[in-house]
Amino acid sequence: MHKMIALEDAAALIPDGASLLIGGFMGIGSPHRLIGELVRQGRRNLTVIANDTARPGVGIGRLIDARAVARLVASHIGTNPVTQQQVIAGELAAELCPQGTLAERIRAAGSGLGGVLTPTGLGTLVAAGKRTLDIDGTTWLLDLPIAADFALIAAHRADYRCNLDYAMTARNFNPMMAMAGRTVIAEAAEIVPVGVIPPDAVATPGALVDHLLRRDAGHGR
Amino acid sequence: MHKMIALEDAAALIPDGASLLIGGFMGIGSPHRLIGELVRQGRRNLTVIANDTARPGVGIGRLIDARAVARLVASHIGTNPVTQQQVIAGELAAELCPQGTLAERIRAAGSGLGGVLTPTGLGTLVAAGKRTLDIDGTTWLLDLPIAADFALIAAHRADYRCNLDYAMTARNFNPMMAMAGRTVIAEAAEIVPVGVIPPDAVATPGALVDHLLRRDAGHGR
Amino acid sequence: MDAKELIARRIARELPDGGLVNLGIGLPTLVSQYLPPGLDISFQTENGLIGVEPLPEEGAEDEYLSDAGGRFIGAVPGAASFDSCFSFALIRGGHLDVTVLGGLQVDEQGQLANWMIPGRMIPGMGGAMDLVTGARRVIVAMTHTARGEPKILRRCTLPLTSVRRVDLVVTDLAVLAPTARGLELRERAPGVSVEAIVAASAARLILPADIPEMRLAG
Amino acid sequence: MDAKELIARRIARELPDGGLVNLGIGLPTLVSQYLPPGLDISFQTENGLIGVEPLPEEGAEDEYLSDAGGRFIGAVPGAASFDSCFSFALIRGGHLDVTVLGGLQVDEQGQLANWMIPGRMIPGMGGAMDLVTGARRVIVAMTHTARGEPKILRRCTLPLTSVRRVDLVVTDLAVLAPTARGLELRERAPGVSVEAIVAASAARLILPADIPEMRLAG
């Protein structure tokens, strides 16, 4: 199976208006090459599901700067004043979701589960319009799965079979997103021969990865 | 924090009638020392939640042989004729649960979630007496979390901080169970200095482990 | 060629290049022996591995590595191991291209029963209910009859494994495709007549004009 | 000693030996600087690590390792990293012994508001809602007033972070314990009178006979 793809071609797979799960936490563990190329190609009207929008000029913040995002689902946008401005101005529709719930919603989508029954957000603004479920006298909030057209994943290493590992807190949302994107595009800081990542260290099996960015002139940040 | 415990003392923590999550799949990745000691101490009337009961004389099968188990939740008991006999004779109450659902129910308990919404088992015997939920026109079966008094975990390696890793298919149910036992007792094939298991390779952080079996005369199978 | 080999060779032709495939214990496991050359298949075992291969030789058993039946196996270069939640997230989440499972009964609705015989055999469903419910494609591998009794029925009499319609049934006599209209007879085993298949089935079969002989892999 | 240091030193005494603790961004982070000697605490950061410690020196930044605010951190020997689902399973599942969080308002029900000011500040809740809902013990670290306005209220006017009653509120003036009967004044900051605390609060406080001065760690 040939899965290696040039940066330009990978970004070209993603049409205007697509929904994207994008890994990373404040830019740590975000797919910076893919983000940069989407900006360069002038993509518009995207739906982005991600933990945050980092800062202006950084990570997903670059898509915000470029006004490429029309809808956002995130747990935190407080570190990016440009995101705040766009939301307050009504240019960007943002749904705020508790971080743990967001992670589980993405996991549910990728795992074929119908929803998440969580105590988080019960009785708060977050519960508005959502169903609750009473189970043996305890009330739970029902949050629905979030899948997307694409998952853009940043790995630490990828091997020739597209098995991925992650480093430290750069792992964050990437593994769940790799299960919930209908097409999964990964970039890795290193591409290594099969066997360098032992079976027990693989966090995302290559079977989940549709495309892996070539190590080409676009490499690096 | 001192968490090392002698085999005899660890088993003595577990009273007759306790509920136990026990890791392993057909004996691969089961806590063989703890199982053996529970049998030796003559524990009775246990509730065991595990994928299977392996075979007579092997893994959880040894608890079955000893008639230590009164209630069982498992996905498969077909490989152990003694289990079958005890169930058919009415001596052992068994609840059969689809394997993926069982894993998620344990994970839900350890993760503070209210249940599992799965398509698995809908319209079959497994759905009898369970609630279903209609979400946007799709029906889901609601399966409830499973916690237990104790989780008995078999790791590959443990470091001095009780961080655990697992090897190959011996991982199976162990990581979820380590989150769902009110008291977690682990045994490891090797105990290694801190740093031997790098942060990215830790599958169960030591914070989840209450007791780790000493490497003592009872070591080995 | 015995019945099991025939079924395994026929199913081997169904596996898609680059696919992720789970083979059930017993007959289905044989399928991996007959893969067409050059086909790149990753085999999953639900107890936690992608990259199953047979043990390379006796004595190389890894006590931490088995298939779902508890038999020692090997792993290919590039294998990945994971816990049971992740394994079933792959299965239930639609990431598994094909599962091949044994069967006790299949009926005109294309529904499968393969996990218990009330009062006689209660092995439990293991991963079968998740596999049949979640895999993109479900292929049933079974003998057409058991001790002379048909296993292809109008309606399953044993408890169902899933209400989902399976995608293909391969027996020692025939290839059947469950459709919305019923069970369609697609292929005959070499030398087996349509009449013999109909006679060995207790279900109404849809009979197209052309019912060719199976082509076998390997 | 400034207000933040006072609060951090007081909270440092609350952390249980062997505990797993999450410190929010800002003021709460200071708590780790004042741990009593010999105390063995594991600090979690919700973006995926147990074993947070400050960066040992400038230049040692790991581009893959930050705290929840995106600042580069270090990791202790024996640290463990994990994904966001696992991290919040720890939090929501009751495995986190203590979380220390900043606050905008706390009320007589012991409820906390700390994630948004409608129309003015919409940072989002990040992990705060999960932390307040799931941690075994929730400690709020905040100044008693903001620009002269009380933050201890009869009822929060800002959107709640959780309906769960927090366990302790430590301010630059007082230690308050939310109880089923209301907010109990437990301790006074050094040199601060009960009257001053009551005056700086817009909630009814329960006043026990003995309200000692805070003891501080470090």
Image (cartoon, coloured by chain):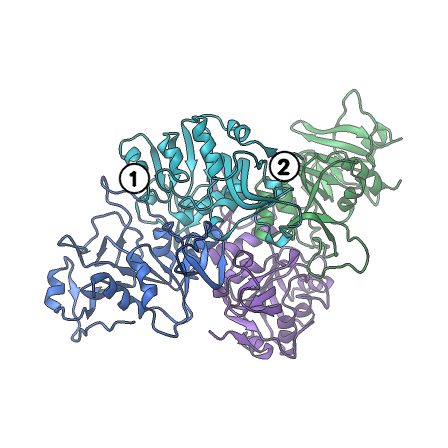
Chain colours: A purple, B cyan, C blue, D green
Q: Quadrant of residue C145?
A: bottom left
Residue A47 horizontal/vertical position (percent): 57, 66
Chain bearing mark 2:
D
Q: Secondary structure at mark 2?
A: loop
Q: Chain of mark 1?
A: B
Q: Quadrant of the C terminus of chain C?
A: bottom left
Left/right placement of residue A172 relative to residue B98 reads: right
In the rendering, at what x and y percent does residue D88 appear? Answer: 59, 48
Q: Is residue C214 above or below residue B40?
A: below
The amino acid beneath tag 1 is Pro
Q: Amino acid at mark 2?
A: Arg
Q: Position of residue A83 (x, y in %)?
A: 69, 63
Q: Residues within 10 Å of mark 1 (few under 14, many from 20)?
A: some
Determine which residue is flagged by label 2. D136
Q: Nearer the viewer, mark 2 or mark 1?
A: 1
Q: Which mark is residue D179?
A: none
Residue under the image location 24 percent in, 45 percent down: C117
Residue A108 position in % (x across, y down): 49, 54
Is residue A82 visible to us here?
A: yes
Left or right of C214 on screen, residue D148: right
**Are discs 2 and 1 less than 8 Å apart at CB?**
no
Q: Which residue is mark 1?
A: B81
Give the crowd class for mark 2: few <14, some 14-19, many >=20 residues within 10 Å. Answer: some
Q: Is residue D73 left or right of residue D190?
A: left
Residue farthest toward the front in the current orientation of the protein: C59
B168 w.r.t. D208: above or below = below
Q: CA distance from mark 2 to mark 1?
A: 44 Å
